[in-house]
Amino acid sequence: MNIEKLSVPIAIVIAGGLIAGALYYSNLKLNKEPLVKNDTTTANVANASNGEINMRPVSSEDHILGNPNAQLIIVEYSDTECPFCKQFNTTLRQIMDQYGKNGKVAWVYRHFPIASLHSKAPKEAEALECANELGGAAKFWQYENLIYDTTTSNNTLDPAQLPKIAGQIGLDVNAFNSCLSSGKYAAKVQADYDDAIKAGGQGTPTSVIISSDGTKTVVEGAQPYANIKATIDALLAP
């Protein structure tokens, strides 16, 4: 048998395997919109890797869906124009359908708009706050669901849609426009963003699952429903 004749096809097979592996690894990482790193981000990621997740405690000031005293609280840091956040929004709705009704899991939404990628996202986050001001928690979550359903992500939502969404869920559109144009919630959105960075967030979505004993579990990216369910089941196990 001629070894030289075999060397070329073997090399092709090996090269093909390496390329396939590289593509698989790349696809695993493409479930999160990356944040442009700065010195603050790098420092806080190091803290998180040492087991320290620095984030503000969940309080009545947060947007909480479900039982505030649930065994597990999922704190999601999200960007309304991030395609992976749109995908993960559907996953968390499924999780709440299964675990929220019996009070085992609650969902906290915090803003993490990456303006360098999605210039429209910060104003959309303010729109969510205006929905909350005018209609309370129920309207906040209705607006949250509908804005993700409406946008095709990647900075594509026409700002003219924001008051239309408000009207669709029964809010006073004039009052909504007045609230949104005032910029009164820009600081609140920025505070959420800063908290996400402090917690070690490097991209969106970033989530932290807080157990009743205070243990924190980081979920990076738009993990599929099966993965989130498995994590929740493990954390809820006696």
Image (cartoon, rainbow, N blue to C red):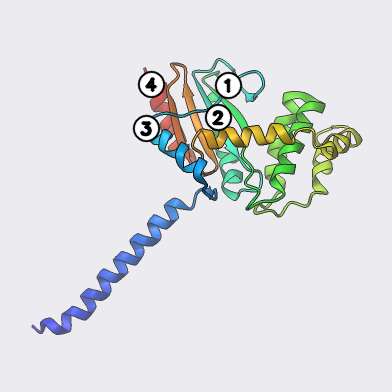
Q: Looking at numbered disc 4 in the image, what kind of residue is underneath it?
A: Ala
Residue at the extreme left of the image, as rendered:
1
**Total numbered circles:** 4
Is 176 left, or right, of 205 in this rendering? Answer: right
Of tags 1 and 3, the one toward the viewer is 3
At label 1, which amino acid type do we have?
A: Val
The crowding category of the residue bearing disc 3, from other C-alpha atoms within 10 Å (few below 14, some 14 to 19, many at least 20), is few
63 relative position to 230: left or right? right
Front disc: 4 or 2: 2
- Mark 2 or mark 1, which is nearer the start of the sequence? 1
Dots 1 and 2: beta carbons under 8 Å?
yes
* Mark 1 residue crowding within 10 angstroms, few (<14) / some (14–19) / many (20+): some
Residue 104 in the image, given as x and y percentages of width and height: 51, 20
Vertical arrangement, residue 127 with respect to residue 158, above or below: above
State the separation of the CA atoms marked 1 and 3.
Answer: 22 Å
Using residue 1 as the reference point, say whether residue 125 is left or right of it: right
Which percent across, then down, holds residue 39? 50, 44
Position of the N terminus, as image quadrant, is bottom left
Residue displayed at 61% across by 48% down: 82
The reply to whether residue 92 is visible in this rendering is no
Q: Look at mark 1 in the image and give the residue it sits on.
A: 58
Residue 75 - label: 2
Residue on which disc 4 sits: 237
> N-terminal of the two: label 4 or label 3?
3
Looking at numbered disc 2 in the image, what kind of residue is underneath it?
A: Val
**Label 4, residues with CA under 10 Å away: few <14, some 14-19, many ≥20:** few
Determine which residue is flagged by label 3: 50
| The image quarter in which residue 123 lies | top right
Q: Position of residue 97 (x, y in %)?
A: 58, 29
